[in-house]
Amino acid sequence: MDEPTFRTIFEPFRIHSVEPLRVSTRAERREYLREAAFNLFQVRAEHVLIDLLTDSGTGAMSRDQWAAIQHGDESYAGSPSYYIFADAVRELFPFEHIIPVHQGRAAEKILFSVIGGSGKVVPNNTHFDTTRANVEATGAVATDMPIPECHDPSSQHPFKGNMDLTALEDLLASRASDVPCVFVTITNNSGGGHPVSLENLRGVRELCDRFGRPLFLDACRFAENAWFIREREQGQGDRQVADIVRDMAALADGMTMSAKKDPMANIGGWLAMNDEDLAVACRNTLILTEGFPTYGGLAGRDLEAIAQGLREVVQHDYLRYRIRSTAYLGEALLNRGIPVLSPFGGHAVYLDARALAAHLSPLEYPGQSLAVALYEMGGIRSCEIGTVMFGRQPDGTEAPASMDLVRLAIPRRTYTQSHIDYVIEVCEQVAARADALPGYRIVDEPKTLRHFTSSFEPLD
Ligand code: F0G
């Protein structure tokens, strides 16, 4: 008999334990905003109703992950949990050396402290903020090379996360010896959460081979990227996601990973590579800063939660729901005339604050203003990805970022469709009054990564 088909794509899980949501009033939220100096990173989580600040470490673990946690072995050296973790990683990313760390930025810090330094330049489709900061902290330059379509909100290119191969070739042709490695971020989070195609990765590999440079993946959202390849790239539609992931890994010499994203854990990460000398140098730094090489900065139980998460994230039912539910939010906003980046990425929908609050100049921080308004209106916490995050230049000047976005990141397996329907309604109400959004100024800012701790004030 033919299998019946249905339009509804439902959450492929049922709820096993619940956390209460704390409802606040608008008047209370105005007060919380003042206390937090209009910086949403400074708002207490219990004062947030729907938390879309990040998809990092905020997902719900499965029954089997909690069971795996019970199985964790806390031996200092040689824990069986390490081998369970390393085997699960190698199943998808068969690199020689798998080095656990407490989260992605620790992998970045260790790697760039070994291969970075002044005079070096690291190309990436788009560096995530901590990746850029870790490159720059060594005195090296971090260069973003997305394809031009990445910054065109109206472009429907299926792989807007792709690397600009011409720009990469130019850089390598002029100064390959200054490039310690080429990075590709899958999916391209800071560029809009867009995927990178296998074809583009092969092009990057070919350039790396031609100029003798290693290729590393920043692979936080590898499974979402692989699902997009399956859906959008010619000849990939019948393949298993796990096989596509192995293809991506086979093109690289190493990777950094935050296990707080697609590996479905609340903490963790790893650094992996094939090069023996590099691994020895990285492990020596690891022991100084994170811990012994069979646990990194993690407990044995965390390693087991990651191993189980890796098995779950490549399941097609999960990925179909994940990508479809993110698109559900994006489509609803688009249908209400709210400017969002499309095609939609996997882990987030990005509001185009520069278009929505066109009366504000980028240096009046339209993204910050929109994010604050979403919180004040409905208790939704989002994240500015724009001039606040990227505007401060290494020479101390300030310049507009290429886009002013507000990211609505969707924690994995955490919110239901009715939560998202509420988010859509709040966005609609804020968008209806967008021409009255105030600009902001920064009252106080730290030297780096200013979006986390700066204080803001609305302009009159
Ligand atoms: N690379 C990418 C592409 C990321 O998105 C992140 C984190 C990291 C590296 C660093 O990993 O947080 O484990 O140290 N992104 C989170 C976010 C924080 O909200 O997008 P980490």
Image: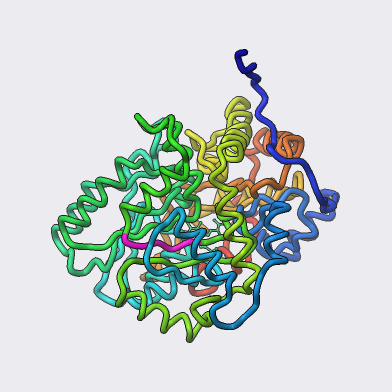
Image side of residue 234 versus residue 6, left or right: left
Q: Position of residue 280 (x, y in %)?
A: 36, 80
Q: Which quadrant, please, contains the C terminus?
A: bottom right
Image side of residue 143 versus residue 424, left or right: left
Above-or-below relation of 395 to 217:
below
Which residues fall within the magenta stretch? 253-257
**Among the 4 quarters of the image, the one containing residue 304:** bottom right
Query: What secondary structure is the stretch in magenta mostly built from?
Result: strand
Residue at 39% of width from left, 38% of height from top?
Answer: 159
Which residue occupies the foreground of this view, 404 or 101? 101
Which residue occupies the foreground of this view, 43 or 110? 110
Q: Position of residue 85 (x, y in %)?
A: 54, 64
Q: Which quadrant, please, contains the N terminus?
A: top right
Q: Kindly tell me whether residue 133 is visible in this rendering.
A: no
Above-or-below relation of 253 to 200:
below
Residue at 34% of width from left, 78% of height from top?
Answer: 114
Reply yes or no: does residue 23 show up in magenta.
no
